[in-house]
Amino acid sequence: MRHLRTVLGLLCLATLPLAAQDTPSLRGTIRDSTGRPLPRVEVSHKSVRTLSDGQGNFRLTPVPLGRILVKFARNGQLIGEVEANVTSDTMPDVSVEVTNDPTEPRTLRGTVVDEAGKPLADLSVDVVSALVETKTDSAGRFVVQNLRPQRHIVRVRRVGYQPTYAFADLNDASGARLRIVLRQFAGQNLGLVVVRADRVPARLAGFASRAARPSGWGRIITEAEIRQRSPTFTSDLFLGLAGVRVVRNGFGSGTLLGRGNCRIALFINGIHVQARSGSGLDELVTPQDLAGIEVYNGIGGVPAELIGGLSNDCGTVALWTK
């Protein structure tokens, strides 16, 4: 039994002989670990399928006599299974609880402070990997709900402060909490300030190594090249690159397409970013945030950290932030 716990087991709800009843059925209710009913869960036994209703109730029919294995799936992903016993003189009812539903939406909570620990109110918090934006309250707190259970990239920005990126792992059903510290630009709050660091951040180690020793497979665009080109939008950096086509939406934000007009796999700081209809690259990262870019036109030479179980035949683009 995977991810499901039988709560009430099998209850005899009918004592009429089977001949006097309708076709043998299995009825039940499915809930999450908080007791909330789960609608639109696919319930199946072999080729017989149904969906749970808005209250989490389902009726699976016809089912054979004897012990049967019932499977539960959501969004095409198996979330568990339970065994039920259908006999000639009973119509079983099974109640199950999802104890660890991997598709259940997650909640991200956090606080943003300055270097002195003072909460920063009314600043923008973007969950880049989900294209969701919110603002901090007067205590510097923020909450983002209904996020996919995966690793997410969070970007925090405010005029006069360095843009800051953080990672939130929402694979755990309890969600995640972040404490993000923003640092002011040196010397002044406004204007362009170039900050140089002697030590390469750990998340940029792989990119820095590949940039220092190009393999010949991919195209590396360094921070110096980005500054030299002074692009208005991040997508401007891909104009004229072989095997990459920039298509802009109604707001001018660019989407990257590879050979055959398929969408290129996009990674930000090593995390795959799911594309959403109508969204573009320029809504995710600004040129000023970038420390470097990698472009691969096919599967050849793509680093392991930029595969993520995907089929990257169309190409891969990796954006690395400062």
Image: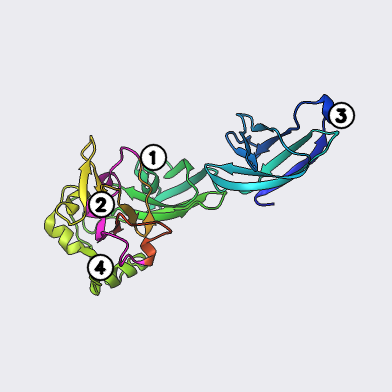
Q: Is residue 321 left or right of residue 140?
A: left
Give the class, few, some or many, for how many residues have Cα within 10 Å of label 3's Cα (few <14, many ≥20): few
Among the two numbered marks 3 and 4 on one chain, the one whose residue lies closer to the N terminus: 3
* Residue 17 in picture, x, y percent from top left: 86, 29
**How far separated are the C-alphas under marks 4 and 1?**
39 Å
Name the amino acid type tagged 2: Gly
Q: Which mark is residue 134?
A: 1
Among the two numbered marks 4 and 1 on one chain, the one whose residue lies closer to the N terminus: 1
Mark 3 vs mark 4: give the one in front: 3
Name the amino acid type tagged 4: Trp
Disc 1 element: strand
**Vertical placement of residue 101 versus 212, above or below:** above
State the residue at coordinates (44%, 43%): 142
**How far separated are the C-alphas under marks 1 and 2?**
32 Å
Residues in magenta?
277-303
Mark 1 vs mark 3: give the one in front: 3
Give the class, few, some or many, for how many residues have Cα within 10 Å of label 2's Cα (few <14, many ≥20): many
Name the amino acid type tagged 3: Pro
Q: Which mark is residue 17?
A: 3
Q: Which mark is residue 258?
A: 2
Mark 2 vs mark 3: give the one in front: 3
Among the two numbered marks 2 and 3 on one chain, the one whose residue lies closer to the N terminus: 3
